[in-house]
Image: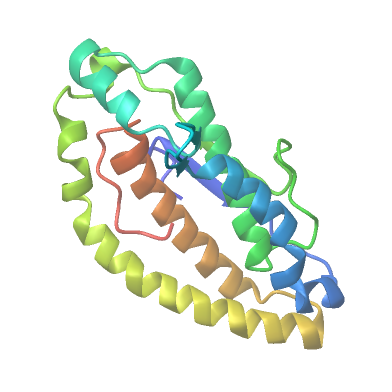
C-alpha cells in the first residue's frame, strides 16, 4: 500500500472458515443494515402539499459545505471531516459484508475488520483554494478505470461466493483484488469529494 497517500485502507483477511449459510443468504441478510446506512448516506426531500407542509431528511457525505469553506475561508471544520470519515467507515463495513469479506454483522460505530483512516488536512498548507472546483473533473480518468475494475470485482465476488459455499474460504487472491478496488475508489472519493487532499490518487490497487 502507498503509505504516503493521506488515505489508508485495509480489510482484515478472515483466515478461517466462513459461515456458508450466512454467505448464501447475504443479499437478504444485509437488508436491515443497508436500510440504516441509506438513512444516513442520502438526502430525501418531500414536496409541499396542499396544506403547505413538506419534509427534508439530510444525510450523506458533506461536499458543498467543505467546498465553500475551503474556497472562501480556507477552513475545513473538524466535525465535518469526522462525519465524512465515520460515514466512509460505516459504508466500508457494510460493503465488505455485502461482498462476503467477513461474516460478522456490520456495526454502526465499531471498526471491526475494516481499517480506514483519512489524514485531517491543514487547509492553509495542504489544500489549494481553487482545486475543489475542478477535482471532480480531474478525476474522470479514474472513473473510467474504476468502472471496469468494479465489473471485474463483481465477477470476483461471484467466484468467491461459490468458493465459500464449497470450501468455506475466500480465495486470498480474489480478496486482495476486491480490497484493492475498494482502496482505489476510496482514494478517489477522498480527493474529488471529501476534498481532504490535493494529492492525485495513484492508479494502483496497492
> Quarter-wise, where is residue 141 in the image?
bottom left
Would residue 146 be visible to someone looking at this image?
Answer: yes
Q: 67 or 147, which lies in front? A: 67
Q: Is residue 58 visible?
A: no
Considering only vertical position in the picture, is 27 above or below 133?
A: below
Q: Is residue 180 above or below residue 121?
A: below
Relative to 125, is 140 above or below?
below
- Left or right: residue 114 versus residue 184 is right
Residue 56, image x, y percentages: 49, 35
Q: Dividing the picture into quarters, in which one does residue 157 lie? A: bottom right
User: For the point 65% across and 65% down, which residue is it?
Assistant: 98
| Res 120 → quadrant | top left
Task: Tell me what residue is drawn at x 19 percent, y 15 percent.
Answer: 72
Colour scheme employed for the rendering of this structure = rainbow
Q: Nearer the viewer, residue 27 or 1?
A: 27
Q: Residue at x 27, y 27 (%)?
A: 67
Say whether residue 197 is left or right of residue 11.
left
Q: Position of residue 104 (x, y in %)?
A: 80, 56
Give x and y (percent) for residue 137: 16, 49
Q: How many marks?
A: 0
Decide which of 196, 98 is in the foreground and name it: 98
- Give the residue displayed 19% in from the left and 20% down from the top: 71
Which quadrant, please, contains the C terminus?
Answer: bottom left
Say whether residue 128 is left or right of residue 153: left
Amino acid at each position: 500500500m502507498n503509505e504516503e497517500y493521506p488515505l489508508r485502507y485495509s480489510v482484515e483477511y478472515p483466515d478461517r472458515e466462513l459461515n456458508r449459510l450466512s454467505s448464501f443468504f447475504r443479499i437478504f441478510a444485509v437488508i436491515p443494515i443497508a436500510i440504516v446506512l441509506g438513512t444516513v448516506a442520502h438526502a430525501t426531500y418531500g414536496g409541499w402539499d396542499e396544506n403547505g407542509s413538506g419534509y427534508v431528511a439530510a444525510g450523506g457525505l458533506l461536499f458543498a459545505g467543505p467546498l465553500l469553506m475551503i474556497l472562501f475561508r480556507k477552513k475545513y471544520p473538524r466535525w465535518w471531516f469526522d462525519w465524512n470519515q465515520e460515514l466512509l467507515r460505516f459504508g466500508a463495513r457494510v460493503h465488505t459484508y455485502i461482498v462476503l469479506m467477513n461474516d460478522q454483522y456490520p456495526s454502526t460505530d465499531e471498526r471491526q475488520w475494516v481499517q480506514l483512516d483519512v489524514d485531517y488536512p491543514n487547509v492553509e498548507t495542504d489544500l489549494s483554494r481553487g482545486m475543489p472546483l475542478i477535482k471532480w473533473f480531474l478525476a474522470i480518468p479514474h472513473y473510467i478505470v474504476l468502472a471496469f475494475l468494479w465489473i471485474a470485482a463483481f465477477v470476483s465476488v461471484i467466484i468467491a461466493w461459490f468458493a465459500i459455499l464449497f470450501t468455506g474460504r475466500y480465495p486470498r487472491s480474489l480478496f486482495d483484488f476486491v480490497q484493492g478496488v475498494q482502496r482505489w475508489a476510496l482514494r478517489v472519493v477522498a480527493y474529488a469529494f471529501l476534498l481532504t487532499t490535493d494529492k492525485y490518487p495513484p492508479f494502483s490497487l496497492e
